[in-house]
């Protein structure tokens, strides 16, 4: 079942633009390996509202990643435990942040207010796109619920005194999931690009979003650093 809605078709243009730019930069060796992934100390932390895909979807993603691992084993591949979709980076990861600096119950209450009355919905994972530093699974949400959640969050936090850093890097609008990060120079660049092209439109699966997680997290959402703060249920 195709879950794309007319008012979300601009997402295809967004993903296509990302893809074209990434391929161009990878071809010209202008890609951006992340040198902090393996840093022994990385104290960038924040809080994030996110979605976890189901096990079936994660298994399909891992099968896809195995194709990349065969030619580029030294890159960073997200384990199933870390795969997610960011709804909103409530407080963007930055050095020195800790939970002691905020009243987490105030955040929980405001997020609950933002999702009250909104129904569970589906996300379809179809195709992959890229940036100069990572590979992402393309996501498309059903019934515009994800955009409604983000709208209410932005509006409610705007009229509060709570610390937040919405859209600091860019205005989040998609439902993508980052699954591979470049951390080393590519050894097999042409083969890497061929796999991206091969799976550009791969149909992964759809899944039902029935709950959202508020977490304290590091930059990469590594399980060993993530702390679940609250789980919100959609009606």
Image: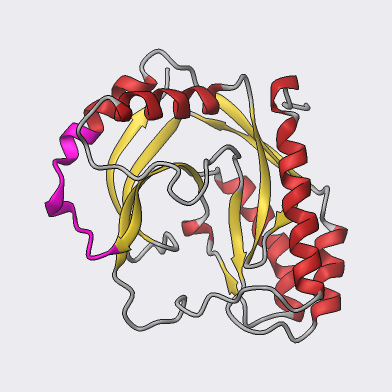
Q: Name the quadrant containing residue 136.
A: bottom right
91 to 188, vertically: above or below: above
Let me know if residue 99 is in the magenta part: yes
Residue 160 appears at what percent x and percent y? 23, 28
165 to 121, vertically: above or below: below
Residue at the spot 37% in from the left edge and 40% down from the top edge: 213
156 to 123, vertically: above or below: above
Q: Quadrant of the N terminus?
A: top right
Q: Name the quadrant containing residue 105.
A: top left
Q: Is residue 135 left or right of residue 213?
A: right
Residue 202 appears at what percent x and percent y? 81, 49
Q: Is residue 213 left or right of residue 60?
A: left
- Between residues 26 and 76, which one lies in front from this camera angle? 26
- Between residues 56 and 51, which one lies in front from this camera angle? 51
Residue at the spot 29% in from the left edge and 70% down from the top edge: 43
Q: Quadrant of the C terminus?
A: top left
**In this picture, which residue range is highlighted in magenta?**
95-107
Specify whether residue 166 is in view: yes
Specify whether residue 226 is in view: no
Residue 95 appears at what percent x and percent y? 28, 66
Tally of numbered tags: 0
Residue at the spot 40% in from the left edge and 13% down from the top edge: 117
Q: Is residue 215 left or right of residue 8?
A: left
In the image, farthest residue toward the top: 117
Q: In the rendered view, how is the structure colored?
A: secondary structure
Let me know if residue 191 is in the magenta part: no
């Amino acid at each position: 079942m195709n879950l794309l809605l007319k008012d979300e078709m601009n997402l295809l243009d967004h993903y296509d633009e990302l893809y074209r730019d990434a391929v161009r930069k990878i071809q010209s060796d202008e890609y951006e390996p992340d040198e902090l992934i393996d840093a022994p100390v990385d104290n960038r932390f924040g809080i994030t509202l996110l979605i976890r895909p189901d096990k079936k979807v994660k298994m399909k993603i891992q099968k896809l990643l195995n194709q990349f691992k065969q030619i580029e084993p030294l890159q960073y591949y997200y384990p199933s435990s870390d795969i997610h979709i960011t709804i909103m980076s409530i407080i963007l990861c930055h050095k020195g942040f800790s939970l002691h600096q905020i009243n987490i119950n105030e955040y929980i209450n405001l997020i609950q207010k933002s999702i009250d009355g909104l129904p569970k919905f589906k996300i379809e994972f179809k195709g992959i796109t890229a940036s100069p530093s990572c590979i992402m699974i393309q996501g498309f949400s059903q019934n515009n619920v994800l955009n409604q959640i983000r709208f209410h969050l932005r509006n409610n936090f705007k009229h509060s005194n709570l610390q937040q850093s919405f859209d600091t890097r860019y205005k989040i609008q998609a439902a993508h999931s980052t699954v591979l990060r470049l951390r080393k120079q590519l050894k097999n660049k042409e083969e890497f690009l061929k796999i991206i092209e091969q799976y550009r439109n791969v149909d992964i699966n759809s899944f039902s979003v029935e709950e959202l997680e508020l977490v304290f997290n590091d930059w990469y959402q590594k399980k060993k650093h993530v702390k679940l703060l609250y789980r919100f249920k959609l009606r």
